[in-house]
């Protein structure tokens, strides 16, 4: 279950979602920030037409809870159950994301006069190519065709023979965009840049490649990390252009992802159940603060310190991802400690803590020690309201960096 939506914070569904630690919202615009497989819409919902119109525009099928429980949901068409003109559903969608209802109705409902033409006018192609004038025009990471076109233009400007964009997947680097013939040297630089986390630029000194440069520049955003790379660049005028462009793009993509992910965090697309680097978990803290400021969703950071051997803690960490929810984030800043970022009510962590301690007992027993969770410390810092943000960020980031940092609670 990815999201519970209601009309008021005191709705029974919203209150139950809070008790269960589920993501929840009273803003229907949150439905536009993630792709859902199915939506359950109550027959008694006062916003049913508005919600189903929004879901229809997003391509999300919706059924009633009764139909879902009876097994009929898989055979129902993905159309609104409320019988209303499609134009009215479009108006409901527009009013959800912002707009004047009278003006939208006037646009959505056609004039019924005989002379009124309702057929759309054909659009003639202009034949002009898209030009990237500024970073605001540069495509997002989701627009593969736009990225390929933009990279091609940058290659022509700098004389590059190949360009690539890679993103880190669940297990390894995955190629998102590639333009031009394969280049073995560039492949090695991409792997090195990802491993070291620093730019890698080399130049040709002799032969046909004299005066050319190869470069790979890593980048990080709140949700992803990857590498932009180019081969055969005109070194005299080109490689510094790529370096500056990648840095500008990182800031542009970072801002865009914060705007998109902040309202929906901790529900993030492309979120893999893996350990996060300290800087990645630190970026998630900013998203948590933004979400708490926006609608009051609570967060907590826990630092668990285990007294056993590094081998036992390592075995625990290998199995820990399977014990967590998709919305939990984690890092392993030192040999003996684990830092977790969780969402929900303060007592929502108690169930997870019991599972972790039981798993730790198993690790100790497998290592030949006693089955005991004694000595495991759980320090916690909570984000209940925006006023908690400074202490929350300072303490959590000290833990992520492997330092001390005082916390309000410890057990």
Image (tube, helix red, strand yellow):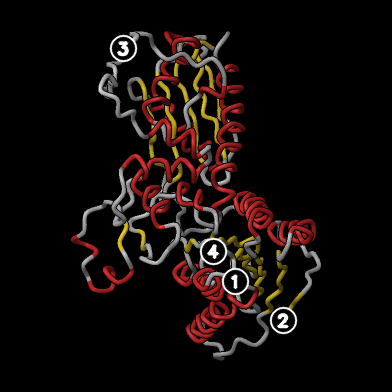
Q: Nearer the viewer, mark 3 or mark 1?
A: 3
Image position of 235 with respect to 148: above or below: above
Marks 1 and 4 in Cβ contact (< 8 Å): no
Task: Tell me how far mark 4 sits from mark 2, CA to CA.
Answer: 20 Å
Left or right side of 25 for 36:
left
Mark nearer the N terminus (3 vs 4) = 3
Left or right side of 342 for 112:
left
Mark nearer the N terminus (2 vs 3) = 3
Q: Nearer the viewer, residue 72 or 148?
A: 72
Instruction: Give the percent coordinates (x, y) of residue 56.
Output: 33, 47
Marks 2 and 3 in Cβ contact (< 8 Å): no
For the point 65% across and 63% down, the residue is 334
Task: Tell me how far mark 3 sits from mark 1, CA to CA.
Answer: 64 Å
Mark nearer the N terminus (4 vs 2) = 4
Instruction: State the image quarter where residue 247 is shown.
Output: top right
Give the class, few, some or many, for how many residues have Cα within 10 Å of label 1's Cα (few <14, many ≥20): some
Mark nearer the N terminus (2 vs 1) = 1
């Amino acid at each position: 279950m990815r999201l519970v939506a209601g009309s008021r914070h005191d709705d029974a569904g919203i209150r139950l979602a809070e008790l269960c630690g589920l993501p929840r919202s009273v803003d229907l615009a949150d439905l536009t920030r993630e792709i859902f497989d199915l939506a359950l819409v109550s027959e008694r919902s006062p916003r049913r037409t508005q919600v189903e119109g929004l879901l229809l525009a997003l391509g999300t099928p919706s059924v009633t809870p009764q139909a879902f429980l009876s097994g009929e949901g898989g055979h129902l068409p993905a159309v609104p159950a409320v019988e209303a003109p499609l134009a009215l559903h479009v108006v409901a969608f527009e009013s959800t994301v912002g707009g004047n209802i009278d003006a939208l109705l006037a646009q959505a409902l056609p004039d019924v006069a005989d002379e009124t033409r309702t057929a759309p006018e054909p659009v003639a192609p202009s034949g002009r190519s898209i030009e990237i004038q500024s970073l605001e025009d540069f495509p997002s990471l989701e627009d593969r065709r736009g990225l390929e076109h933009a990279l091609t233009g940058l290659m022509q400007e700098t004389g590059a023979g190949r360009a690539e964009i890679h993103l880190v997947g669940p297990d390894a680097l995955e190629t998102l965009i590639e333009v031009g013939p394969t280049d073995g040297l560039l492949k090695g630089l991409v792997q090195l840049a990802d491993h070291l986390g620093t730019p890698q630029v080399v130049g040709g000194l002799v032969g046909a490649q004299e005066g050319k440069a190869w470069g790979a520049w890593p980048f990080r955003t709140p949700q992803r990390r990857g590498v932009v790379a180019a081969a055969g660049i005109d070194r005299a005028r080109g490689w510094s252009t790529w370096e500056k462009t990648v840095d500008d793009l990182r800031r542009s993509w970072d801002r865009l992802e914060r705007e998109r992910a902040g309202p929906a965090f901790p529900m993030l697309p492309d979120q893999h159940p893996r350990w996060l680097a300290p800087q990645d978990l630190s970026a998630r803290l900013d998203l948590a603060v933004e979400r708490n400021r926006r609608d009051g969703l609570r967060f907590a950071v826990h630092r668990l310190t285990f007294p056993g051997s590094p081998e036992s803690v390592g075995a625990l960490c290998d199995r820990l991802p399977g014990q967590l929810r998709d919305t939990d984030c984690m890092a392993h800043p030192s040999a003996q400690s684990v830092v977790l970022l969780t969402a929900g009510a303060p007592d929502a962590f108690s169930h997870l803590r019991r599972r972790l301690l039981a798993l730790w007992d198993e690790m100790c027993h497998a290592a030949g020690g006693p089955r005991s969770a004694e000595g495991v410390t759980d320090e916690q810092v909570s984000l209940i309201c925006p006023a908690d943000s400074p202490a929350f960020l300072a303490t959590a980031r000290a833990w992520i960096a492997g330092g001390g940092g005082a916390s309000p609670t410890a057990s």
